[in-house]
Amino acid sequence: MARTYLTAVSKMPGLEVAGFVSRSGRLPSGSPDDCAAARHLTDLECAFDAVILATPPGLHHEGALAAAALGKHVLSEKPLDVTRKNMDAMIAACREAGVTLGVAYQRRMSPDNRAVKQLLDDGAFGRIYAADLSVKFYRDQAYYDSASYRGSRHVDGGGPFVQQASHNIDLYGWFFGLPRRVVSMMGTFAHDIDVEDHGAALLRHDDGMIGTIVASTAARPGFAARLEMHGENGTVVLENDVITVWEIEGIENPSSAPAGAIHSGSSVSVTDTFGHEAVLEDFSAAVREGRDPAVTGESARAASELILQIYEGFVP
């Protein structure tokens, strides 16, 4: 992720990477020659305005609290963190320090997702009866073996629901809000890890809408994330943040092709930084203008709340 942000920042006038905090003390490949490096944020000897948290999810609160104590703005990778206690501490610390807290849920920056969100808010689809989210990715055992925290409950927070599907679950919550009730089933089928690698959740919302969420890293070879919405006025299907089916009576398809696919179902590599650039542009503008970023800490917390409800709704 550090290399992804290096690439994104390099494309953006007015932004530059000043230094890195690394547990190993090493700089990522491709770092500018004049970049500072330190093992702790308080030891970083360079001028900087904000920090980007690209550490494992369960460590995000450590970086956020350290940055807030120094009066630095914070942009966290997803998810915000993996426990309610840690997330609340991050939000409170940044609020008290008067610094901006943003979260990189870059799928919200997709033009098609934003168009669908606006139409939902306007009630253009009528009552939504069903929303079905499928995030069937594939990761091999080598992926989980590549770092000791991968596939752990304490640091990773869980399996594909909190990791690979986090972006899509954020969209689900952004579109439809939190459910009234969640029941889930999950298991570990294809990997030697401590958490699930495949699961399904059934959700009931206050307005009666029934949702389903399937998350997997055992679906070889890996497939594009897909969200289907069915309601009074028809059906919409999004695949990898692009509208692929539009059957809404009386409304023209608002799709506009994004710069590229934000993520692949079969690879951890981020080959197109369009989404990260959009997040960075919005975040830096929010800091300059003294406004909230597109994805605030509170808003990102809702995605983690939904994920926690899915884990807590587990039926053996």
Image (cartoon, grey):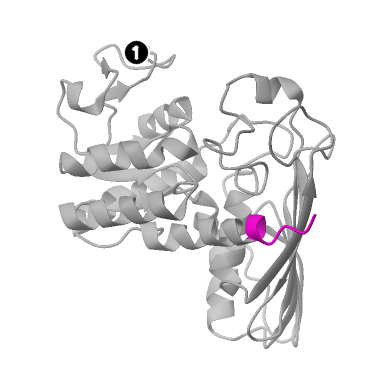
Displayed quadrant of residue 73: top left
Displayed quadrant of residue 113: bottom right
Secondary structure beneath label 1 = loop
Residue 148, image x, y percentages: 58, 22
Displayed quadrant of residue 13: top left
Q: Is residue 292 left or right of residue 266?
A: left
Image vertical order of residue 272 relative to residue 307, above or below: above
Q: Is residue 315 left or right of residue 195?
A: right
Q: Is residue 175 left or right of residue 216?
A: left
Image vertical order of residue 130 relative to residue 243, above or below: below
Image quadrant where one finds the C terminus: bottom right
Q: Residues within 10 Å of mark 1 (few under 14, many from 20)?
A: few
**The magenta stretch spans which residues?**
310-316
Image vertical order of residue 136 relative to residue 236, above or below: above
Q: Is residue 161 visible?
A: yes
Residue 51, image x, y percentages: 29, 37
Q: In the rendered image, which residue does mark 1 sit on?
A: 25
Residue 111, image x, y percentages: 55, 60
Image vertical order of residue 151 relative to residue 235, above or below: above
